[in-house]
Image (cartoon, grey):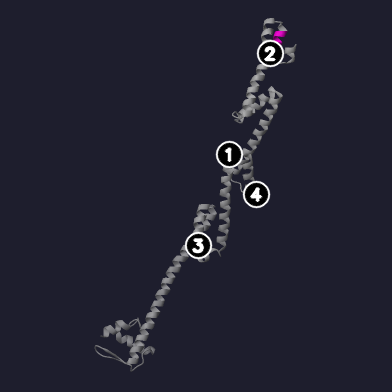
Amino acid sequence: MLSSHYHRYRVIEPGAKDLSSMLEMLKASGKLPDGQFALGKSKVFLKNKAAQQMDTLREDAFLLVAIRIQKSVRAVVWKARFKSWKATLEAVRAAMANRSEPELTASMDLMNELPYGGKHIALYKDALALLNRLTEETKLVAMLEAAVKSRSKAAILSAVQAAKGMNPPYAPPSLADAESLVALIEKEEALTVGLRKACKDRDLKTIDELLSQAEEMNMGETEEVKQAEALKKRLEEEQSAVEGLNAAIASKDMASLSAFLKMCSEMGISSPEVKK
């Protein structure tokens, strides 16, 4: 019986080694008045008031133990949360340093676990601004690449203007490629205009020079180049016929003169040499 009482009430005085020392400690602290209990060889006798007091003390002790346990559990939980939040903030900083849109998106999602979603933290605002910037840059790179692929001068210029219009301006490698392509397209356009004029003027020398430039620029498949090449061949044939005619006139070779006159007639040449 003594041991059962001790085990029941030992929570009141955890430092007591047995029932006797526990009762003495309660008596010394004034929690259990003297004369309210008696310790026998196998039993302990408690007056009703003392028994109630012991049960009250036992409940209070259990409450204190429960509070200490809750405090310890909360400490462990909050320590784990703090560690997780710290790791999240470090991940956000690393993603910002790397300027990695996927990493920053993932780490920003983790910030939702922070109090208030982390929106009150300056780092969150900076990270959100950078994420928006990276998203714009990604869209702009795609726009530049699509414009370059289409070789549309208007589309390329629009994408270039958008890149330079960002604050601060954005200059990815694809921007330099786009600007180089615009310069090339403008050069091709100028060459095309030159070929059209040279063909209209039937200027063999200019046509030959422009066709050499077109070959260097790999413009052989354009319609203007094909037409210029055909006209060049025709003009060279005409020139050859006229030169032959002049040689026949100079040599007074009637057979050659007749042959070249026929050739010029078939080619529709009406130069002064033919009339002569």
Name the N-terminal-most of marks 3 and 2: 3
Tell me, yes or no, if residue 216 can be seen here. yes
Q: Residue furthest left?
A: 42
Q: x and y percent of residue 206 in the render?
A: 69, 25
Name the N-terminal-most of marks 1 and 2: 1
Q: x and y percent of residue 245 in the render?
A: 70, 11
**Quadrant of residue 63 within the rendered picture:** bottom left
Q: CA distance from mark 1 to mark 2?
A: 47 Å
Residue at the spot 66% in from the left edge and 12% down from the top edge: 263
**Residues packed near mark 2 inside 10 Å, few (<14), some (14 to 19) or many (20 plus):** few
Q: Secondary structure at mark 4?
A: helix
Name the N-terminal-most of marks 4 and 3: 3
Q: CA distance from mark 2 to mark 4?
A: 63 Å
Q: What amino acid is labelled 2 in the image? A: Ser
- Quadrant where the N terminus sits is bottom left
Q: Secondary structure at mark 3?
A: helix
Q: CA distance from mark 3 to mark 1?
A: 42 Å
Q: What amino acid is labelled 1 in the image? A: Ser
Main secondary structure of the magenta stretch: helix
**Residue on which the image places disc 1:** 150
Q: Nearer the viewer, mark 2 or mark 4?
A: 2
**Residue on which the image places disc 3:** 112
**Residue on which the image places disc 2:** 265
Q: Nearer the viewer, mark 3 or mark 2?
A: 2
